[in-house]
Image (cartoon, rainbow, N blue to C red):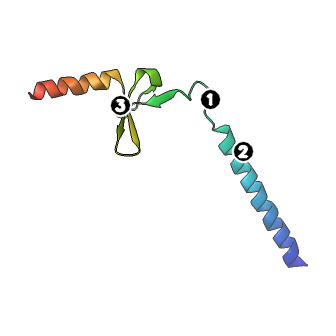
Amino acid sequence: MTISILAVLFLAAILAVSFIGFRAIIRQGKSPEDINKEKCSICRTQYHRSQLIARQVGDYRLLHFCQSCIMSLHNEMLSKN
């Protein structure tokens, strides 16, 4: 009898923890304004996707670059030549 009571309490605790964890995951969803935003791959500043250049590296990796980082890389390349 004691074992069955402990088993029921254990299952109830597992269900409670999973329910609380599921609620926490659901609340961290992206807002509609954050859906169209990405971070620059170099400076990690968040921009709207229309302000970034996207380049695919390899089969699956997609890098995003902002205008200031592109200009910085361009000036760095010109200074080396």
Q: Are marks 1 and 3 in contact (CB under 8 Å)?
A: no
Q: Is residue 11 above or below residue 27?
A: below
Residue at 72% across / 55% down in the picture? 18
Mark 1–mark 3 distance (CA, rounded to whole Å): 23 Å
Quarter holding the C terminus is: top left
Mark 3–mark 2 distance (CA, rounded to whole Å): 33 Å
Residue at 69% across / 50% down in the picture? 21
Mark closer to the observer (2, 1): 1
> Which type of secondary structure does the marked residue at label 1 adopt?
loop
Q: Quadrant of residue 1?
A: bottom right
Residue at 85% across / 68% down in the picture? 8
Where residue 50 sits: x, y (%)?
45, 21
Q: Which residue is mark 1?
A: 31
Where residue 39 sits: x, y (%)?
43, 31
Where residue 49 sits: x, y (%)?
46, 25
Label number found at residue 43: 3
Q: Quadrant of residue 27?
A: top right
Q: Which residue is mark 2?
A: 23
